[in-house]
Amino acid sequence: HTHTSLPHTLPHKLYPHAWGATFTVAVVGPWTCDPMYSKALPDLAARLATARLNKDPYTKKGYWYDYTLVNEDCKTSRALARFTSLEGYGSAFLGPTNPGYCSSAALFAKNWNKPLLSWGCLKPNMEDGQYPTFHRPLPLSSRVLFSMLRYFRWAHVVIVTSEDDLWKATGHELAASLRALGLPVSTVVTMEPDKDGPTKALKRIRELDLVIMCMHSALIGGVAQYQLLTSALNIRMIDRGYVFIPYDTLTYSLPKGTNFNALTNDSLLRKAYDAVLTITMDSGENTFYQSFKDAQEKFEIRTSTPPDQVSPFFGTIYNMIYYMAYAVEKSRMAAGRWVDGETMLQSDGGVKFEGFNQQISSDEDGLGMLARYVVLDSDGGDKLYMTHTLEAPHTLGKFGAVKYNGRSIHFAGSSPSTDSRCWFSPYITCGGGRWSSVGGSDRIGISFGGSEEGEGPLKIVLNLNDLIFINTQTSIRGDWVWLKRCPNGNTVSSVSNSTKNIFTKLRDMRHENLNLFLGLFLDSGIFGIVTEHCTRGSLEDLLNNEEMRLDWMFKSSLLMDLVRGMKYLHNRDVIHGRLKSRNCVVDGRFVLKVTEYGFNEMLSTQSINFDEGRPEDQLWVAPELLRNSKLMKRGTFHGDVYSFAIIMQEVIARCAPFCMLDIKLKSPPPLCRPTVSADEAPLEVIQVMKQAWSEEPDKRPTFEEIFKQFKSITKGKKTNIIDSMLRMLEQYSTNLEDLIRERTEELEVERKKTDQLLAQMLPRSVCLALKTGKPVKPEHFSEVTLYFSDIVGFTTISALSEPIEVVDLLNDLYTLFDAIIGQHDVYKVETIGDAYMVASGVPNRNGRRHAAEMSNMSLDILHCIGTFKMRHMPDVKVKIRIGLHSGPVVAGVVGLTMPRYCLFGDTVNTASRMESTGLPYRIHVNQSTVDILHELKMGYKIDTRGMTELKGKGVENTFWLVGRAGFDKILPRPPDLTPG
């Protein structure tokens, strides 16, 4: 048949069987406009799937399956416009890829009554009825992600997208989906395309240490992700504990245990990827690359492209088409008529088939495809290893948990902080407000509903539409902020232009030690300033917290932060005018920030009556300002320095201003100053403090001078409280690591000693089985060689020796033997008194080599015994006799207390008789052993002894082993050969 050439489509037809109608799948995706999706070779994937489906015994009974490739535009608006004209392109639609118009496409499919299976639709509840012809050809990625985040208790995440319209839409839809599941995703940041784009994006997300990357994976050639990760490495976010999760790997099976060329060939990416935690569909017995190569070799895929140059999304396309066909066939058999959208929905559950390289099934309730997922991690190398798994039934996120696979995640820095379990439970409401009142009743915690891009509002004056007052029993979306209420704010009806100009100037100030102004608030009789929220509260709160231990390094860090902030303000001609420990706030990183600067100036421009407040609020006010109320309203630079000096006293002494003096606030004595002990701070710091609260304003140093003096005191070192904490933690961690390393090494040494001791008592294979709790079953060995030896005249030697001397003799002798047997493939069975028993070929089989190994060992032992001397009787020769025999045995572990590895069988008895009927300095060998030695043809020298009676065995022909070709060691002369 023929086809009409349609714009942006690649039609493909296979001739159907005469008895079957054709079911065409329209595969919709950005196959030409997005190079990474092009690497998935969608045409070949769909061709392979349909070819196999038309031969599959389950599906070939019904329809003949065909496909049409439809190219989706990478711009959301144009893609939607094109989708409206696709009704006649297929019997069902696989796609679209773009989540931005996926819901709209589902409504069109509903109108056409055709199945639409899209992995791009991220709304969690699309199966609930509004989209009756919609099905999921993949597990919902946000649910899989939610299950993983629930396991690790990571609720607060930030999403970064590339500039592409497709990925921007994906980022925002993913954020909405995770929010619908209960997670507080507040920020979606789009990475600008210029060279500074990645760095700018990363700087905007510093507050959260878990980043989801909506862009193509760097492992398959994604440039945006490569730039983001390497930029994170350059600004040291990798080694500070940030964790990056790629989103796109959720939609395909990334191979594990495989060398990735992108990591092998790029050391920067390899280091950066240490901070990446990959969640992907699990591979079966074969990885995607292996399965692709197998299909190439069978000529099912006709392309010369190497497998590692193909995107694993190839396998996903194949799986989705296969899943759709199985669901269609099940619906056809159940309904007995043509399968349309609603028919398929009624019976698409319970299918199971072998996917491209993994097992695929579907939920019994018709909620779509199920597949097993894994967490892959890197330890800085070029391979990813598996740490956790999420079984297929648990990908719906309703029940079940992630399973730990025995290998821990290697975090490049510290692991991300964990969140409350309430974020992951539908039955518990999270308490969002951590600070409902900070530094007194004039500052109120609120939630600020800024834009999802995280840029905050652009307008200056905010109202109740922009702010939500905290209810600590509910979870609020948005950013936490503080509202500083102005006194007599109920008299303000509008904000003057002068106030707006002043506020705009203050809001545009950016410094690490300034608390940022976000807006002015005017509503419901309240006029105030909205500022950035700092989780540690005010400096006063921190100093009053007895559980917080602050050494001088911490204190100097806080003071240095305050000096920097005030120096920045004064250099820009901004007078604070109301500086005190209550309006110095501390953020989560223990960085001190100055707030409420310029407050007096705004009160003045709004003509608000100046409120002097409580008497204790005047403790930070300079004397010259207390004497001049007009000057107090404006404030002075010298007055700010005096206030700083009082804060210094608070920090050094860690108590309220003037706490060491018994004074009445309303009538203080003249020239009253706090007293600080010299041992509470360096003398230079106390001198700076005293200069700063000088009675004569002109004698007070400026903050520029104070900064230089502090730098001189700290010897130029940059002091920051978080750096100090990190140094302390690093030192503690180093000490702890050294201690752990030392203890681990000791433990390892002891473990090796234990294993070595155990291995001396039992074979290693038996030791491993016993340690893992497995039973050790008796084992039959068809042929082994056994060695027995004893000391001639040992009874006489024992009678003439002290017990300790007998022990020393046996210890010296058997230590010598033990050193020899270590050079041969033999196993020491046991020693009983002067008897020494060795086996070869058991527990490790070695063919017929056992006879040679035992013969070599016997010759070496005989050579060493010729020169051996007893310590207490050096003139008495120690003579041994050796017996060898080969044959079958049964071996097993006997006993629970002091278990022994024992050998049983007639071979053991015969070998013992060979030793007992032997002669000193002789190796007595049985016929069975001699036959094996002759077969080995290794040049063993054997003399015939003749017929010898063996107790319980009768008379047998036995032999002496006297040497071997190439064995040039001297053997002792047997007494039976000595003349006379």
Image: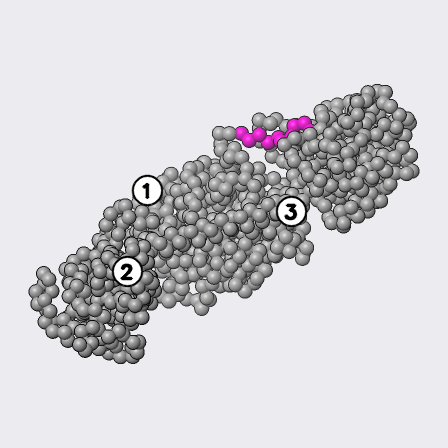
Is residue 311 found left or right of 806 in the rendered image? right
Q: Nearer the viewer, residue 901 or 920?
A: 920
Mark with earlier residue (3, 2) = 3
Gap in angstroms between the C-alphas marked 1 and 2: 74 Å
Mark with earlier residue (1, 2) = 1
Q: Residues within 10 Å of mark 1 (few under 14, many from 20)?
A: some
Q: Tell me if residue 782 comes above or below residue 324 in the rendering.
A: below
Q: Position of residue 466 (x, y in %)?
A: 68, 32
- Indicate which disc residue 727 carries: 3
Q: Is there CB contact under 8 Å for labels 3 and 1?
A: no
Type of the residue with mark 1? Ala
**Is residue 417 in sight in this rendering?**
yes
Mark with earlier residue (3, 1) = 1
Residue at 30% in and 45% down:
333
Q: Nearer the viewer, residue 272 or 211?
A: 272
Q: Secondary structure at mark 2?
A: strand
Residue at 23% in and 70% down:
921
Is residue 33 found left or right of 645 in the rendered image? left
Taking the view exactly as shown, the residue that stands out farthest to the left is 954
- Indicate which disc residue 828 carries: 2
Q: Position of residue 928 (x, y in %)?
A: 16, 69
Q: From the image, tell me which residue sits under label 1.
A: 335
Is residue 226 found left or right of 23 in the rendered image? right
Q: Residues within 10 Å of mark 3 (few under 14, many from 20)?
A: few
| Residue range (magenta) | 429-438
Gap in angstroms between the C-alphas marked 3 and 1: 70 Å
Residue at 54% in and 54% down:
274
Q: Secondary structure at mark 1?
A: helix
Type of the residue with mark 2? Lys
Q: Is residue 762 magenta?
A: no
**Is residue 319 in sight in this rendering?**
no
Residue at 80% in and 31% down:
675
